[in-house]
Amino acid sequence: MHYVVGSGLAGVACSMALIARGEEVTMLDTGLDLEPERANLVAGLSRQTQREWDPAALARIKVLGHGEGVPRKLVYGSEYVYEHPEGRQPVSGKDVDFSPSYALGGLSNAWGAAMLPYLQSDIDDWPISVDDLAPYYKRVLDFVPLAASIDSLSDRFPLYTENHCNHRASTQAQSFLSSLERHRKDLAADGFTFGKSRLAVTVQRPSGDGCVYCGLCMFGCPYGLIYSSRETLVKLKADPNFRYLGGVVVERLEERADGVIIHARTIAGESQKFEAERIFVGAGAIPTTQIVMDTLELEGATLKDSQYFLLPILSLSGGGARKEDLHTLAQIFIELQDESISDRSIHLQLYTYNEIYDLELRRRFGRFYPMIPAGLMLDRMALMQGFLHSDDSFKVRVRRNNGTLSLRKVPNTWTRNVVMRVVSKIRNASLKLGAAPLLPMLQIAQPGKSFHFGGTFPMTRTPKRGETDILGRPHGLKRVHLIDSSAFPSIPATTISLTVMANAYRIGAEHTD
């Protein structure tokens, strides 16, 4: 019996590969879930048309999260995705902002659904190549929906599927794209490539129902159209070779000649042991790191992050965004390659109007809100999210401390330098981009805020202590595989989730007994 730890993107992708091989699989998962009362509220909305939705019910899910800078995204108004099981201490840290998940489906409940493959030039330090990942990008996109278009991004970032559907861009996004198209050649000379966003979203189901462009994406889709690994888990549970065990917290592993002893406990605190022929650990970069450090009695590791920054911008044309039916996930992807800034690519995601902007303005200005030109700002405001390669980002030192993890940011003045050069590049291209950046509102987040991190046990051809081989096996272990981003040698700027799934599928498909 093979065991998989975690029901997030890595866990379900690896499980799909193992089931395709004919293996018997048991998934161990903590599986924290949405509060029953709130789940019933969402179920009620899902059975209604948009016109039938009760404003009071909507108000209960339109809730902003807390946190310094960018508020943490809630799911239907709930924090459950970020809660820790009883007795499992949260990670402690200084100048970091990490939020591991023990939820059913992990962070795929709260992600932005952005899907891009990696460029070979961004993983030239990996022991595997994009060609090695390519067949598994395709396998993943056989069961994960993709809303995407064939455009100039496709030359550098293949779609890896013919089963994709188009998603409607907002009026603001169409205006941005028109400006970008008019200046395509000049932008290309400046290192910019652009196109519509690629999202793991079901635009329309076979039954005919689909996205109604209600603008609730960032609060939680009432119709469940944004992909979560929970969808694939439902399919896995229908297979007789698959078993799911929730309410289990894996703590450490003990490898023997013929298998692995899994030391765990229930959420209630009861000790448990499982015997596995082989185990695939995809609990998320931080929980996986904790399991491996406790297993191998490692005192320290280095975690790599993709630096995140947020730049509000004002459209130079257009208006009326607040009255439009639209989706509120990323609308446009912009890729920047400029060796005067970095040897690595820089990834930008453009978000047009979102009701969260208004809620955040109200929260910040309080009783002074009526005195600001909020309507004019909101009709033209958009947000540009930026991500850097881990080579250009802060690193985080991880240490074991009395059964928990302590995380500390490693100083790096170069990171801010790169961000400011990117922002300057955007400012200089304002007329071509069709928008002016609001430079005083730039936010450079603490490590972890991007949710794109890992690399604590990097893959290498000849692993040493604290490293893994190309099948994610930590040095000294033969039957334990790390299948999430904890085994990535570096973290490129482009979106992490598709490659996490592809690599997990690859390990599940290629491991040898």
Image (spheres, helix red, strand yellow):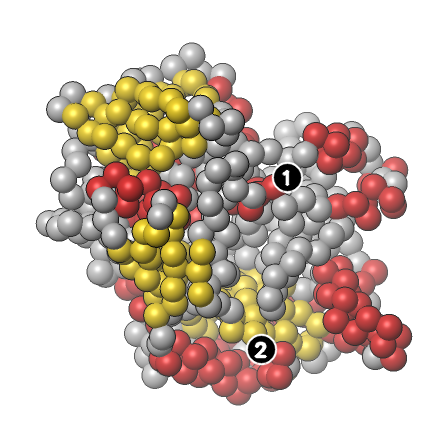
Name the one closer to the observer, 106 or 257: 257
Q: Position of residue 115 (x, y in %)?
A: 48, 51
**In the figure, 282 relative to 378: above or below?**
above
Q: Residue at x 41, y 18 (%)?
A: 242
Q: Nearer the viewer, mark 2 or mark 1?
A: 2
Q: Which residue matches tag 2?
A: 442
Can I make out residue 195 in this image?
A: no
Q: CA distance from mark 2 to mark 1?
A: 31 Å
In the displayed structure, 58 sits above or below 3; it is below
Furthest-front residue in this view: 402
**Residue ranking furthest to the top:** 240
**Horizontal relation, residue 56 to residue 432: left or right:** right
Q: Amino acid at mark 1?
A: Leu
Say the numbered circle drawn on residue 71. none
Kindly check if marks 2 and 1 are in contact, taking CB atoms under 8 A apart as contact.
no
Give whichever of 344, 310 is nearer the camera.
310
Q: Residues within 10 Å of mark 2 (few under 14, many from 20)?
A: some
**Residue drawn at 70 percent across, 30 percent down:** 36
Q: Give the left or right position of residue 38, taking residue 142 as reference.
A: right
Relative to 274, is 94 above or below? below
Comes first in the chain, label 2 or label 1: 1
Task: Tell me if residue 313 comes above or below residue 469 in the rendering.
Answer: below
Element at label 1: loop
Q: Which mark is residue 225?
A: 1
| Horizontal and vertical percent position of residue 460 | 17, 51
Q: How many marks?
A: 2
Q: Amino acid at mark 2?
A: Leu
Residue 124 horizontal/vertical position (percent): 23, 61
Local packing at callout 1 (Cα closer than 10 Å; few below 14, some 14-19, many 20+) is some
Numbered disc 2: secondary structure: loop
Quarter occupied by the C terminus: top left
